């Protein structure tokens, strides 16, 4: 291995039946390697895929309530929310107001705050209940990362 002018480097690559690949074009002088180009591209794709596999994907689960959800339905949905947070998913809980039920905004907010209080040990509230159009949204993120 050594430093060669471009013509000499190309000759060496052709003699070996390989390609001259520019590794670092911004360096002075540019850095090139005599390697199999297809193998080089394959290795780069493999590295990129490995990096992508290590990134964590955020999963958002939704739970929908009505403004007049009764206790049994609330408990059923709370257990599901608890399970989602234990799995490591974010939770989007919302109250959907249909027609004239928008007059029960207060009940919807109380319901979401009650859910936040009940799930305190499993998740942390990212966004407090906020009315957007016909729905009141609240986001809860899990406290512990999944293993």
Image: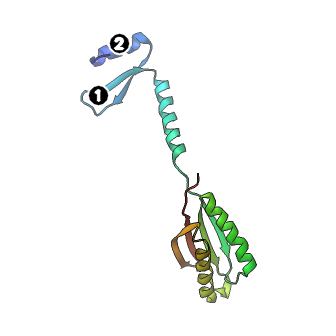
Compared to 112, does 31 lie above or below? above
Mark 1, residues whose alpha carbon is within 10 Å: few (<14), some, or many (≥20)?
few
Picture coordinates of residue 3 (x, y %)? 27, 18
Mark 1 in CB contact with mark 2 (< 8 angstroms) = no
Relative to 71, 44 lies left or right: left
Q: Secondary structure at mark 2?
A: helix
Mark with earlier residue (1, 2): 2
- For the view shown, which residue lies furthest in the front direction? 121
- For the view shown, which residue lies furthest in the top direction? 15
Q: Gap in Å between the C-alphas at discs 1 and 2?
A: 17 Å
Work out whether residue 13 or residue 93 is closer to the camera in this orientation and state it.
93
> Colour scheme in the image?
rainbow
Q: Residue at x 63, y 58 (%)?
A: 87
Q: Secondary structure at mark 1?
A: loop
- Give the labeled residue for mark 1: 30
Q: Residue at x 46, y 21 (%)?
A: 36
- Give the labeled residue for mark 2: 11
Q: Residue at x 66, y 86 (%)?
A: 101
Relative to 93, 51 lies left or right: left
User: How many numbered dots are placed on residues in this image?
Assistant: 2
Relative to 15, 99 lies left or right: right
Picture coordinates of residue 53 (x, y %)? 54, 43
Picture coordinates of residue 71 (x, y %)? 72, 80
Query: Does any portion of residue 92 appear in the rendered image?
Result: yes
- For the view shown, which residue lies furthest in the left direction? 28
Picture coordinates of residue 39 (x, y %)? 49, 25
Relative to 108, 24 lies left or right: left
Q: Quadrant of the N terminus?
A: top left
Q: Residue at x 60, y 78 (%)?
A: 112
């Amino acid at each position: 291995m050594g430093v060669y002018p471009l013509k000499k480097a190309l000759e060496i690559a052709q003699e070996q039946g390989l390609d001259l690949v520019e590794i670092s074009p911004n360096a002075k002088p540019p850095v090139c390697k005599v390697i199999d180009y297809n193998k080089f591209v394959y290795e780069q794709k493999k590295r990129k895929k490995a990096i992508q596999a290590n990134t964590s994907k955020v999963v958002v689960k939704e739970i929908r309530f009505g403004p007049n959800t009764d206790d049994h339905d609330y408990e059923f949905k709370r257990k599901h929310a608890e399970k989602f947070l234990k799995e490591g998913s974010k939770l989007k809980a919302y109250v959907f107001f249909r027609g004239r039920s928008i007059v029960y905004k207060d009940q919807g907010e109380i319901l979401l705050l009650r859910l936040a209080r009940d799930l305190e040990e499993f998740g942390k509230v990212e966004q407090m209940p906020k009315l957007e159009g016909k729905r009141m949204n609240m986001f809860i993120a899990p406290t512990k990362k999944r293993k």
